[in-house]
Image (tube, grey):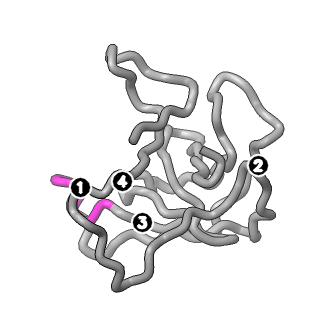
Amino acid sequence: MTDIDQLLFQDQLCGGTLIGTQWVLTAAHCLDGSRYIRLGEHDLRTLEKSETELTIDKSIMHPDYNDDIYVNDIGLLKLSRPVKYTNYMLPACLPDFNTEIPLYQKCYITGWGRDENGQDTDILQYGR
Protein backbone atom coordinates (compact mmCIF):
# COMPACT_ATOMS: atom_id res chain seq x y z
CA MET A 1 0.00 0.00 0.00
CA THR A 2 1.64 3.21 -1.07
CA ASP A 3 -0.44 5.54 1.08
CA ILE A 4 0.68 4.08 4.40
CA ASP A 5 4.35 4.41 5.21
CA GLN A 6 6.19 2.29 7.72
CA LEU A 7 9.09 3.23 9.92
CA LEU A 8 12.08 1.21 10.99
CA PHE A 9 13.81 1.99 14.24
CA GLN A 10 17.51 1.16 14.40
CA ASP A 11 17.16 -0.91 17.60
CA GLN A 12 13.80 -2.57 17.07
CA LEU A 13 11.25 -2.99 14.34
CA CYS A 14 8.13 -0.91 14.82
CA GLY A 15 5.48 0.22 12.40
CA GLY A 16 4.14 3.71 12.09
CA THR A 17 2.01 5.81 9.80
CA LEU A 18 2.87 9.13 8.24
CA ILE A 19 0.03 11.54 9.13
CA GLY A 20 1.56 14.85 8.03
CA THR A 21 4.72 16.26 6.52
CA GLN A 22 6.54 16.02 9.87
CA TRP A 23 4.45 13.62 11.98
CA VAL A 24 4.33 9.84 12.35
CA LEU A 25 1.75 7.97 14.44
CA THR A 26 3.10 4.88 16.21
CA ALA A 27 2.79 2.81 19.38
CA ALA A 28 4.02 4.31 22.65
CA HIS A 29 6.07 1.19 23.39
CA CYS A 30 8.12 2.03 20.28
CA LEU A 31 9.25 5.39 21.68
CA ASP A 32 12.49 4.03 23.08
CA GLY A 33 14.80 6.92 22.31
CA SER A 34 15.58 5.89 18.72
CA ARG A 35 16.93 8.72 16.64
CA TYR A 36 16.18 7.58 13.09
CA ILE A 37 13.26 6.24 11.14
CA ARG A 38 13.00 4.92 7.62
CA LEU A 39 9.97 5.93 5.58
CA GLY A 40 8.88 4.03 2.50
CA GLU A 41 10.26 0.72 3.81
CA HIS A 42 8.95 -2.39 2.07
CA ASP A 43 11.60 -5.13 1.99
CA LEU A 44 13.81 -5.28 5.08
CA ARG A 45 16.51 -7.22 3.21
CA THR A 46 17.31 -4.49 0.71
CA LEU A 47 17.64 -0.71 0.52
CA GLU A 48 15.12 0.48 -2.04
CA LYS A 49 14.87 3.77 -3.94
CA SER A 50 11.52 4.41 -2.25
CA GLU A 51 13.12 4.66 1.22
CA THR A 52 14.12 7.81 3.05
CA GLU A 53 15.88 7.85 6.41
CA LEU A 54 15.15 10.81 8.68
CA THR A 55 16.06 11.85 12.19
CA ILE A 56 13.48 12.16 14.93
CA ASP A 57 13.25 15.62 16.46
CA LYS A 58 10.75 14.85 19.22
CA SER A 59 8.59 12.02 20.56
CA ILE A 60 5.30 12.42 22.41
CA MET A 61 3.82 9.56 24.42
CA HIS A 62 0.18 9.42 25.54
CA PRO A 63 0.20 10.81 29.10
CA ASP A 64 -1.76 7.80 30.42
CA TYR A 65 0.30 5.10 28.69
CA ASN A 66 0.80 2.03 30.90
CA ASP A 67 3.65 -0.20 29.72
CA ASP A 68 2.60 -3.06 32.01
CA ILE A 69 -0.68 -3.65 30.18
CA TYR A 70 -0.21 -1.46 27.06
CA VAL A 71 -3.16 0.82 27.81
CA ASN A 72 -3.12 4.01 25.70
CA ASP A 73 -0.25 2.56 23.66
CA ILE A 74 -0.04 5.43 21.19
CA GLY A 75 2.54 8.08 20.42
CA LEU A 76 3.71 10.65 17.92
CA LEU A 77 7.09 11.30 16.36
CA LYS A 78 8.03 14.70 15.00
CA LEU A 79 10.52 14.45 12.16
CA SER A 80 13.50 16.80 11.95
CA ARG A 81 12.37 18.10 8.58
CA PRO A 82 9.26 17.89 6.40
CA VAL A 83 8.85 14.84 4.18
CA LYS A 84 8.58 15.41 0.46
CA TYR A 85 5.57 13.36 -0.62
CA THR A 86 6.13 10.80 -3.38
CA ASN A 87 4.20 7.85 -4.79
CA TYR A 88 5.73 5.80 -1.94
CA MET A 89 5.35 8.33 0.87
CA LEU A 90 1.93 9.87 1.35
CA PRO A 91 0.10 10.60 4.59
CA ALA A 92 -2.73 8.38 5.75
CA CYS A 93 -6.21 9.86 5.49
CA LEU A 94 -7.51 10.15 9.03
CA PRO A 95 -11.19 10.72 9.85
CA ASP A 96 -12.37 13.96 11.43
CA PHE A 97 -12.58 14.02 15.23
CA ASN A 98 -16.36 13.46 15.37
CA THR A 99 -16.56 10.84 12.63
CA GLU A 100 -18.42 7.73 13.74
CA ILE A 101 -16.99 4.55 12.27
CA PRO A 102 -19.68 1.90 11.76
CA LEU A 103 -19.38 -1.43 13.54
CA TYR A 104 -17.66 -4.10 11.44
CA GLN A 105 -16.28 -1.52 9.03
CA LYS A 106 -13.63 -3.20 6.87
CA CYS A 107 -10.17 -1.72 7.13
CA TYR A 108 -6.56 -2.48 6.25
CA ILE A 109 -3.67 -3.34 8.53
CA THR A 110 0.02 -3.46 7.63
CA GLY A 111 3.21 -4.64 9.25
CA TRP A 112 6.07 -7.11 9.15
CA GLY A 113 5.22 -9.26 12.17
CA ARG A 114 4.71 -12.98 11.70
CA ASP A 115 2.88 -14.79 8.93
CA GLU A 116 0.22 -17.50 9.29
CA ASN A 117 2.99 -20.07 9.90
CA GLY A 118 4.52 -18.05 12.74
CA GLN A 119 7.54 -17.02 10.65
CA ASP A 120 8.97 -13.49 10.76
CA THR A 121 8.53 -11.63 7.48
CA ASP A 122 10.94 -9.33 5.64
CA ILE A 123 8.34 -8.08 3.16
CA LEU A 124 5.67 -5.66 4.36
CA GLN A 125 2.40 -7.55 4.77
CA TYR A 126 -1.14 -6.24 4.69
CA GLY A 127 -4.54 -7.63 5.42
CA ARG A 128 -8.13 -6.56 5.31
In this rendering, would 47 be left or right of 64? Answer: right
Q: Which residue is mark 3?
A: 75
Disc nearer the start of the sequence (1/3): 3
Say which of marks 2 and 1 sits in front: 1
Tag 4: amino acid: His
Q: Position of residue 80 (x, y in %)?
A: 71, 68
Local crowd at mark 3 within 10 Å, few (<14), some, or many (≥20)? many
Query: How much space separates mark 1 and mark 3, taking CA atoms?
Result: 25 Å
Counting residues from the start of the chain, the first of labels 4 and 1 encountered is: 4
Q: Where on the picture, by quarter, is residue 81?
A: bottom right
Query: Which region is colored magenta?
Result: 66-73
* Residue identified by numbered label 2: 52
Q: Can you identify the residue that label 4 sits on?
A: 29
Q: Are marks 1 and 3 in contact (CB under 8 Å)?
A: no
Q: Residue drawn 57% across and 67% down?
A: 19
Q: Amino acid at mark 1?
A: Tyr
**Label number found at residue 104:** 1
Give the CA distance from mark 4 to mark 1: 27 Å
Q: Amino acid at mark 3?
A: Gly
- Image point (47%, 37%), residue name: 126
Q: How far apart are the two marked residues, 2 and 4, measured between alpha carbons?
A: 23 Å
Q: Is residue 97 left or right of residue 25?
A: left
Binning the other alpha carbons within 10 Å of mark 4 as few (below 14), some (14 to 19) or many (20 upward) gives: some
